[in-house]
Amino acid sequence: MTTKNALIGLWAETSIHAGAGSSVDGIDLPIQREGHSQWPCVFGSSVKGALRTKAEDKLGKDNTSITYVFGPDSSSDKASEHAGALLVSDARLLLLPVRSLTSHYKWVTCPAILQRLLRDAERLNISLKFTVPDVKESGIAITSATEATDLFLEEYRFTTNTADLTDLITVLAKITGIQSEELSDQLVIVSNDQFSYLAKYATPVTPHIAIDNEKKVVEKGALWYEETLAPETILYFALSAHKSRGDDMPAEAILNCITQGLFAESPYLQLGGNETVGMGWCKVTVLASEA
């Protein structure tokens, strides 16, 4: 079966709350995380739902192309007739924005994240060429800055080692749409262990309350803590398209419904909850496979 693929970069312009559905460690509303690494992510079902919502807003809920691309509406009596032709992966973390005393913030990643990006691209038949920096020692941070200075991320102090990250920065700019100069200033690569710590504990957790409109006081018991991914977080997800099952709509046309039909005019996608308070807006960059 012929398959067409694309890698979709997501640059968060506002906070994202894709909720996990159960409280943990004193956080009432934690975000979704990968089970084995605890790195933040947005599950594929949430991403697919966001894509379908954008398509329905643009084309109308009853448009036949939406049925071929995403499958029949799960609430309709035709839900079991056939599956959709579009495969949507989890949105995986690529660059985590972290507070820094050395700058306004830094985009932090690690060798394991970058190696996984290369594997994902290879599976999608997308050529990405860069060398993954080797960072095994804790307390070391790789940057492309020319000055060797100490770097502070959250409460930790790192010694910087400079390296030529030109190829990596070129690839990241292609996936994210961020200017190479900005990536060169902000990009930091730390060890896998230290990145895992930052990915678990450097995400914002904010308290919320509800006000009783009559009494103008906080409602009893209406205090909760909500975790989010900060603005400037960089994620990516994979799209794969097959020929539709409802008719003979080819894989390329299925993929184009998303990459061109949804994002050519408006390269934005709203992910997760709290849309009505402005959360979840990401700028989208499309990187299509070469064959």
Image (cartoon, helix red, strand yellow):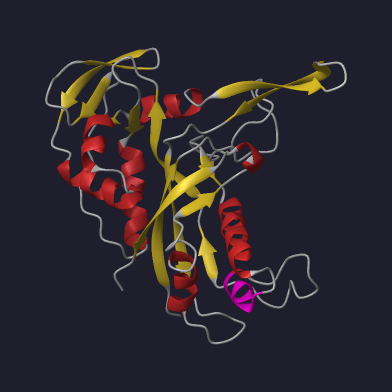
Q: Relative to residue 271, is residue 193 drawn left or right? A: left
Q: Which residue lies furthest to the right in this view?
A: 214
Q: Position of residue 98 (x, y in %)?
A: 39, 25
Image point (25%, 21%), residue name: 140
Residue closer to the observer: 222 or 78: 222
Q: Nearer the viewer, residue 261 or 7?
A: 261
Residue 211 visible (yes or no):
yes
Residue at x 41% of width, y 56% of height: 8
Main SS of the magenta part reads: helix
Residue 22, magenta (yes or no):
no
Q: Name the image quarter holding residue 180.
A: top left
Q: Where is residue 94 in the image (x, y as percent from the top left)?
A: 38, 41
- Asked if 264 appears above or below 19 in the picture, the reply is below
Asked if 12 appears above or below 200 in the picture, the reply is below
Judged left or right of residue 224, residue 249 is left
Q: Can residue 273 be seen from the camera position used here? A: no
Numbered range of the magenta stretch: 63-69
> x%, y% of residue 182?
25, 36
Q: Is residue 67 magenta?
A: yes
Q: Residue furthest bottom?
A: 248
Residue at 55% across, 48% down: 270
* Front residue (pair 113, 155): 155
Front in this rendered view, residue 122 or 100: 100
- Report the residue at 56% width, 53% height from top: 47
Query: Across the whole image, how many numbered discs are drawn on residues?
Result: 0
Q: Quadrant of the N terminus?
A: bottom left
Quarter of the C terminus within the rendering: bottom left
Position of residue 149 in the picture relative to residue 221 (left or right):
left
Q: Where is residue 229 in the image (x, y as percent from the top left)?
A: 51, 33
